[in-house]
Amino acid sequence: MLVIAGLVFLVVFAVVMLLAAASGSLARQQQKQLLERLESVTMAQRRRPEDEGLSLLRVEMLSSVPALNRWLAQLDWFPNWRRVLQQSNLNWTLTGLLMKCLAAGAAAAAGVYWRTRVWPFALAMGAVAGSLPYLYVLWMRARRFNAFEAKLPETLELMVRTLRAGYGLMSSVEMAAREMPEPIAGELR
């Protein structure tokens, strides 16, 4: 009888120990998953020195002169130009672009008139030269779009691999922002 009681005690003790080990393993696995999630969140929130200037709100300066800036903000003549200028990723203001266009047009018109003394031809050449800064902005925009489109499949593949590896979406985006070249990295940041 004592042997049977000892065997029952050993079986019950073994079952309790197995249950405790299994629940401890489950708790460790849950703790490991929680730590991985926390690490992915903190990795997404880490800031690098080049990210310090990023903001969700874009404060747009049309001119460096405050009074002229307020006046131009009220007019809103060139909303498409502003969007194209932002997409080209040049550090030009709308006023700067307009001044470059006017200066190029005036210089070309004056030079052609000085050389030919024909007003209509000088004005036509001034108009052509005045459009060159805007054409440069369009060229830079197209170049940036082409670079973005060329690297987009590779970026999406990287994000898919990180998601399959168990990272969260934000960690996947952060990793793609670190690994990929511009302009994709800047857009993802």
Image (tube, rainbow, N blue to C red):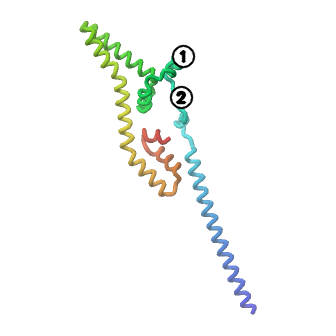
Residue at image x 65%, y 68%? Answer: 24
Q: Mark 2 points at which residue?
A: 59
SS at mark 2?
Answer: loop
Outermost residue to the bottom: 1
| Within-10-Å neighbours for mark 1: few <14, some 14–19, many 20+ | few
At 28% from the left edge and 12% from the top edge, which residue is drawn?
122
Horizontal arrangement in the rendering, residue 92 relative to residue 110 (left or right): right
124 lies above or below 146: above
The spot of residue 82 in percent (x, y) is 44, 27
Question: Which quadrant of the figure has residue 150?
Answer: top left
Front-most of residues 53 and 64:
64
Tell me which numbered mark, 2 or 1, is placed earlier along the sequence.
2
Q: Which residue is at a point 38% across and 36% down the rendered structure image? A: 144
Numbered disc total: 2
Q: Where is residue 98 in the image (x, y as percent from the top left)?
A: 41, 20
Of the residues shown, which amino acid type is indicated by label 2? Val
**Quadrant location of the N terminus in the rendered image:** bottom right
Q: Residues within 10 Å of mark 2 (few under 14, many from 20)?
A: few
Q: Look at the picture and state if 131 lies above or below 183.
A: above
Identify residue for label 1. 67
Q: What is the distance, in whole Å, between disc 2 and disc 1 at their CAs?
A: 16 Å
Mark 2 vs 1: CB contact within 8 A: no
